[in-house]
Amino acid sequence: MTPADRGPLRIALLHDDSSGGDHASELADGLDRAGHDAELVRASTVGALESLLRRRGFAGSLTRVPAGLTALLRDGFDIVHAFSTTDAAAALAWRRLAARPAAAVFTCVEPLDRARLADRRLRLWLLERAVRDSDAVTATTEASRAALARWLALDAPVIDSGDVAGYERLYHDLLDRRT
């Protein structure tokens, strides 16, 4: 059975403007053309609280996690595809709360190196959790795949944003395993 024979999926592509925006937009367009309902979801931050957390040395936009989770729970998504570690935290919380088979995918788009992994509180913890708990992890480039292999001993497949058939297979395989 081909992915097209299985019917359309409802997919949330959760990202912020600094991580994965181009990849997510291109993928959303391709998935929509393939007959799926792909929605770009951008969670907002709580400005004052976000500033306080940043001054205290915390990673990412942590206030986006509850906002992202709220946005995801409003719609009946089959798949949530996250492009940052904080978005992956929201996707994983959504998967736990989903009332049906659902899957969370994490694509690592940020550059990984020693300085970047240790520069902010919770950065490494969020990355490890995204990699360990997501149903699938992919990389956008060979360089990001190599960084995942080097720093986290993970051999993630590289799937280009234009490879809609590759993502369809991945999404359907994940849902087949979750049912």
Image (cartoon, rainbow, N blue to C red):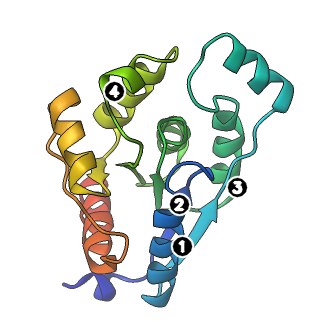
The residue that mark 1 highlights is 38
The residue that mark 2 highlights is 13
Q: In the image shown, does 48 or 147 lie closer to the viewer? A: 147
The image quarter in which residue 126 lies: top left
Rate crowding at label 4 as few (under 14), some (14 to 19) or many (20 or more) other CA atoms within 10 Å: few
Tag 4 secondary structure? helix
CB-based contact (under 8 Å), mark 2 and mark 1: yes
Q: Say which label, 2 or 1, has the lower sequence index.
A: 2
The residue that mark 4 highlights is 128
Compared across the picture, whether 140 is left or right of 146 comes to right
CB-based contact (under 8 Å), mark 1 and mark 3: no
Compared across the picture, whether 103 is left or right of 71 comes to left
Q: Mark 2 and mark 3: span between their CA atoms?
A: 14 Å
Which amino acid type is shown beneath numbered disc 2?
Answer: Leu
Q: Which mark is residue 21?
A: none
The residue that mark 3 highlights is 74
CB-based contact (under 8 Å), mark 4 and mark 2: no
Tag 2 secondary structure? strand
Q: In the image shown, does 89 or 70 lie closer to the viewer? A: 89
Rate crowding at label 1 as few (under 14), some (14 to 19) or many (20 or more) other CA atoms within 10 Å: many
CB-based contact (under 8 Å), mark 3 and mark 4: no
Of circles 3 and 4, the one toward us is 4
Q: Say which label, 2 or 3, has the lower sequence index.
A: 2
Which amino acid type is shown beneath numbered disc 4?
Answer: Glu
